[in-house]
Amino acid sequence: MTHRRWFTPWLLAGPAMVWLAVFNLWPAVNTVILSFTNAKPLDGGQFTGLENYGRILDDEQLADALLNSVVFMLVCLPLLTFLPLLLALLVQRKIPGLTFFRTAFYTPVIASAVVVALIWGWVLDDRGLVNGLLQRSGLADSPVSFLTDRWLLLLSAIALTVWKGLGYYMVIYLSALANVPRELHEAAAVDGAGPFRRFRHVTLPGVRPTMMLVSVLISVSALRVFSELYVLSNGQGGPGGRDMSVVMLIQMYSRGFTGHLGYASALSLMLFAITLGPMLLLMRLNRKAA
């Protein structure tokens, strides 16, 4: 009987442990192994040591992709950290049509990223809605190259990402705001604090842990951006591939029968190391603030 009690937890946890080992742990270990080889699809390749990592230092295409990913993250991070908080403060109030506004802001979240990017592609195309309005209003003599200019394409993808992510992070902030004690706001108001001072000294400290969590989520997802840039650039990565993100570069090297799996694996590990940076920094800042 004692033996059966000891064995039962392992029996129950066994399927989950096998699942994690096969679909999470082994792919991670295999990526590390492949990064030291010249493996290709259907070809295990040979051990090449640190050759793939040395190649990273001389890859000009990677430099462009890394710059695009970092710019994407640095612009998205403040916008998606503070705008959803402002939206949450607005829709938290009891105003006419509140349900409509909450639904309208959240609707883009449930839409597929690919579908949203396709719609934005049609809107920002040379013959799309935005260029039509700009030309008819006299603000532009010719179509603006939203999807064919390097930086305009990157900004278009950022605008798409911010628009789609506002509702998701707004809901997270709404949960955090509901946990800020109303008594603190009332006490601050009695002491003569205006709306701005109550926001600064009551609301912000109350939602600070949530802001840290949101910042980490945004940083990681921004560094892993793929669908938005891929669809808006029609799978080309922008003019000359210069708007390619690091994830798009990894996909380019790993796909097809001539794919360089070894180099793509080394790039994946580099991206993993870069992603850890903002996470550790924000965790340290959160610990200091606490």
Image (cartoon, rainbow, N blue to C red):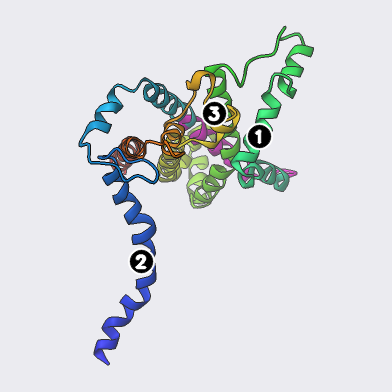
Q: Is mark 2 on a helix, strand or loop?
A: helix
Image marks 1 and 3: residues in contact by CB distance under 8 Å: no
Q: Earlier in the sequence, mark 1 or mark 3?
A: 1
Q: Is residue 96 magenta?
A: yes
The answer to whether residue 90 is visible is no
Query: Mark 1, residues whose alpha carbon is within 10 Å: few (<14), some, or many (≥20)?
Result: some
- Picture quarter containing residue 263? top left
Assign a secondary structure to mark 3.
helix
Q: Is residue 209 above or below residue 162?
A: below
Q: Residue 191 carries which label?
A: none
Q: Mark 2 belongs to which amino acid?
A: Val
Closest to the observer, 197 or 123: 123
Question: Which residue occupies the foreground of this view, 248 or 122?
Answer: 248
Q: Which of marks 1 and 3 is in front?
A: 1
Q: Is residue 201 left or right of residue 229?
A: left
Point out which mark residue 158 bears. 3
The amino acid pointed to by label 1 is Leu
Residue type indicated by callout 3? Ile
Mark 2: give few (<14), some (14-19) or many (20+) Cα within 10 Å.
few
The image position of residue 209, as x and y in percent, is 40, 45
Q: Where is residue 95 in the image (x, y as percent from the top left)?
A: 71, 43
Percent position of residue 51, x then y? 24, 31
Q: How many labels does the image show?
A: 3
**Residue linked to disc 1:** 118
Q: Up-down: is 9 above or below 200?
A: below
**Looking at the image, do the residues carrying marks 2 and 3 touch, with CB atoms under 8 Å apart?**
no
Q: Name the residue under label 2.
A: 18
Q: Which of marks 1 and 2 is nearer the N terminus?
A: 2
